[in-house]
Amino acid sequence: MITFYSKHETDFSHNGLGCLDNYIINPLVCEELNGIFSLKFDYPITAPHADELLQERIVRCPVPEMPPQLFRISERESAIGGTFHIVAYHVFYDLVQNLIEDTFVINRNGNYAVTQLLGAAQFPHPFTGDSDISAINSARLVRKNIVEAFLNDELDNSFAMPKYKVKT
């Protein structure tokens, strides 16, 4: 079931402001490894809740091989044929404006590093995380946003794992 919520909702155990299942057109979840995680769909302008699908509202959507995920509406574009197009990004990207001022992960595994990085955020947030990386490493992060620290594998010091390259 695909449901939506107010932008400030923190309890997602109910059906929120409404269910979109009967009218949603072509819902598509895109997830790139260490990259964008988004939800895109079309919705008829005359369908129930059409006027309520606004920027910053949260959509809860089933995702293959995962529990349902939360996406924040970023774009609502008018489209031809009486529908509008919605683009929403995973709520994890709410952390893009949250800075790690300075933290030094010293000789720790992935699980400890995730906890330390999230705890070093400039502003309080509701996010938690874990990792199955058992390797021990160190990294110092200074003035990096949390999303960049987790996803940008081109940084000298980040949590992101470099992509594997095949040597020929």
Image (tube, rainbow, N blue to C red):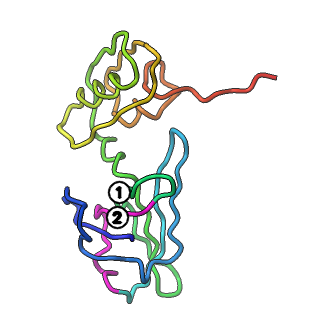
Circle 2 sits on which residue? Answer: 59
Q: Residue furthest top?
A: 107
**Residue located 50% across and 53% down the image:** 65
Residue that extends furthest to the right in the rendered view of this protein? 168
Please identify the quadrant where the C terminus is shown: top right
Left/right placement of residue 27 relative to residue 56 reads right
Residue for point 41% across, 60% down? 88
In this picture, residue 56 sits left or right of residue 8: right
Q: Which residue is mark 1?
A: 70
Instruction: Please name the amino acid that badge 2 sits on.
Output: Val
The image quadrant that residue 145 belongs to is top left
**Which element type, helix, strand or loop, lies under badge 2?**
strand
Residue type beneath disc 1: Leu
The residue nearer to you, when weighing 15 against 151, is 15
Report x, y in % for residue 20. 37, 77
Q: Residue at x 34, y 28 (%)?
A: 114
Question: In the picture, which quadrant includes the N terminus?
Answer: bottom left
Above or below, 6 relative to 149: below
| Magenta-colored stretch includes residue 56 | yes
| Number of residues whose C-alpha sits closer than 10 Å to that of mark 2, classed few (under 14), some (14–19) or many (20 or more) | many
Answer above or below: position of 128 versus 15: above
The answer to the question of whether label 1 and label 2 lie on touching residues, with beta carbons closer than 8 A, is yes
Instruction: Give the residues drawn in magenta, as a range.
Output: 48-62
**In front: 85, or 13?**
13
Q: Position of residue 83 (x, y in %)?
A: 46, 82
Residue 27 position within the rendered picture, expressed as x and y whole percent measured from the top left: 50, 69
Count of picture labels: 2
What residue appears at the point 45 percent right and 52 percent down from the top-left corner?
66
